[in-house]
């Protein structure tokens, strides 16, 4: 059964999460350097069945664009050219990074581990994906 993949895109690092085959639970996949993202996705799509991708769309509280919005949109445009058959859906990503850090604190994770930005991005992608599943299931 195909999965759903979540991308928390950043200029330096990108967090990835994926659903289980039944699309009930989101799990962190990895955090990687953004420069490696397209190659990673190419290889991942060869190995795993993915039905669609969701990507965090950064906006301010008043729904205006942030400094990161054009970067994400440029990636989406490249993604559509590289993977034209793969649907990509923009979702609200406000507060996901803050929620990720808070969940790390709440779980008792040591400060040194909470400073791992790749892990923060991976958890943010997981939170975004689980919210998507909860609202679209």
Image (cartoon, rainbow, N blue to C red):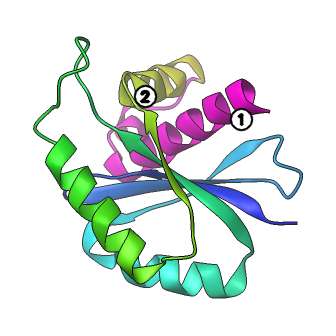
Any mark on residue 133, and which? 1
Query: Between 3 and 83, which is closer to the camera in this rendering?
Result: 83
Looking at the picture, does residue 67 appear above or below residue 81? above
Horizontal arrangement in the rendering, residue 59 relative to residue 93 (left or right): left
- The residue at the point 56 percent across, 57 percent down is 53
Q: Quadrant of the N terminus?
A: bottom right
Q: Which residue in the protein does label 2 denote?
A: 96
- Residue 13 percent coordinates (x, y): 29, 58
Query: Between 34 and 53, which is closer to the camera in this rendering?
Result: 53
Any mark on residue 4, and which? none
Dot 2: element: helix
Which SS type dominates the magenta stretch? helix
- The residue at the point 41 percent across, 84 percent down is 39
The boundaries of the magenta stretch are 108-137
Distance, label 1 to label 2, CA atoms, is 15 Å
Q: Quadrant of the C terminus?
A: top right
Dot 1: element: helix
Crowd around label 1: few <14 · some 14–19 · many ≥20 (10 Å): some
Looking at the picture, does residue 41 appear above or below residue 27? below
Q: Answer yes or no: do the residues labelled 1 and 2 have beta carbons within 8 Å?
A: no
């Amino acid at each position: 059964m195909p999965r759903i993949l979540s991308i928390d895109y950043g200029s330096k690092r990108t967090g990835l999460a994926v659903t289980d085959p039944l699309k009930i639970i989101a799990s962190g996949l990895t955090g990687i350097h953004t420069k490696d993202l397209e190659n990673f996705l190419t290889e991942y799509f060869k190995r795993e069945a993915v039905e669609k991708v969701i990507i965090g769309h950064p906006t301010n509280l008043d729904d205006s664009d942030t400094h990161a919005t054009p970067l994400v949109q440029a990636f989406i445009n490249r993604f559509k050219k590289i993977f034209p058959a793969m649907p990509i859906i923009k979702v609200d990503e406000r507060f996901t990074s803050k929620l990720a850090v808070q969940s790390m604190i709440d779980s008792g994770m040591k400060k040194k581990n909470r400073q791992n930005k790749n892990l923060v991005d991976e958890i943010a992608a997981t939170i975004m994906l689980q919210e998507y599943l909860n609202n679209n299931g």
